[in-house]
Each structure stands twice: as C-alpha cells, then as structure tokens.
Image (spheres, rainbow, N blue to C red):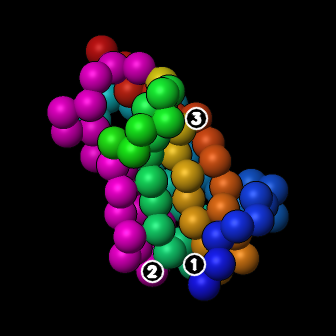
Amino acid sequence: FSSIKELDEVSVELNVAPVPAADVVNITANELIREGYVYDLSGRVVKSNTAIDNYSFQVQRNALNAGLYIAEIRFDKGFVKRKIVFAN
C-alpha cells in the first residue's frame, strides 16, 4: 500500500479522543488503519505501530512526557496527521 497522499480526516471519519489524554488516546476511522506513528515536535518518531490492520487502535502514553505530539495514521489511500496531547 502507499501512504503518500494526505487525506482529509473527514473523508475517513477520523476520531481521536480524549484530547488531552492522561494515558491512552483512542483512534478510530471508517477506513482500515494500517499503521500509526507518533512524532514529537522535533519530528522524531517516538512510537510506531506497523501492523494495526483494524478500524481502531490505542496510543499508550507509557514513558512519554506530557505535551503535544503529532499522530500520523496511515491508510491504504494515504495518511492523516492529527495533534494529540498528553496531560500531566
């Protein structure tokens, strides 16, 4: 599959909640989610899940510091980027 095209989050009915989150962010869509990546604000990958193949998945905070991150969710047709926040 190819994830080179940025998609409109409305077209895949992307839902990211809660924001801000304490420990877990739930991500759902009406398209099959293939992969999920979380980047810090310097662009470094801090979490990756390369075998989701489902319509939902969870981003676990684990050892990530409180703050703003960018989630990139990849589908067969492309990808969507969304801000996620982990609170103190």
Q: Is residue 88 left or right of residue 25?
A: left
Marks 2 and 1: CB-CB under 8 Å? Answer: yes
Which residue is disc 1 drawn over?
A: 32
Q: Is residue 20 visible?
A: no
Amino acid on which disc 3 is placed: Lys
Residue 54 drawn above or below residue 73:
below
The residue that mark 2 highlights is: 53
Name the side, left or right, on which 36 lies relative to 87: right
First reached walking from the N terminus: tag 1 or tag 3: 1
Q: Nearer the viewer, residue 74 or 16?
A: 74
Label 2, secondary structure: give it: loop
- Residue 40, quarter of the rendered image: top left
Looking at the image, the residue that sits furthest to the left is: 63
Q: How many residues crowd mark 1 within 10 Å: few (<14), some (14–19), many (20+)?
A: some
Q: Earlier in the sequence, mark 3 or mark 2?
A: 2
Residue 39 visible from this viewpoint: yes
Decide whether residue 18 is among the magenta residues: no
Q: In the image, which residues are magenta?
A: 47-67
Q: Picture coordinates of residue 68 (x, y %)? A: 48, 24
The Cα–Cα distance between marks 3 and 2, rounded to whole angstroms, is 22 Å
Amino acid type, mark 2 = Asp
* Cα gap from disc 2 to disc 1, whole angstroms: 6 Å
Q: Residue 43: x, y in percent?
A: 50, 36
In the rendered structure, which disc, 2 or 1, sits on the residue that comes first in sequence? 1
Residue pointed to by mark 3: 83
Q: Quadrant of the C terminus?
A: top left
Element type where label 3 sits in the image? strand
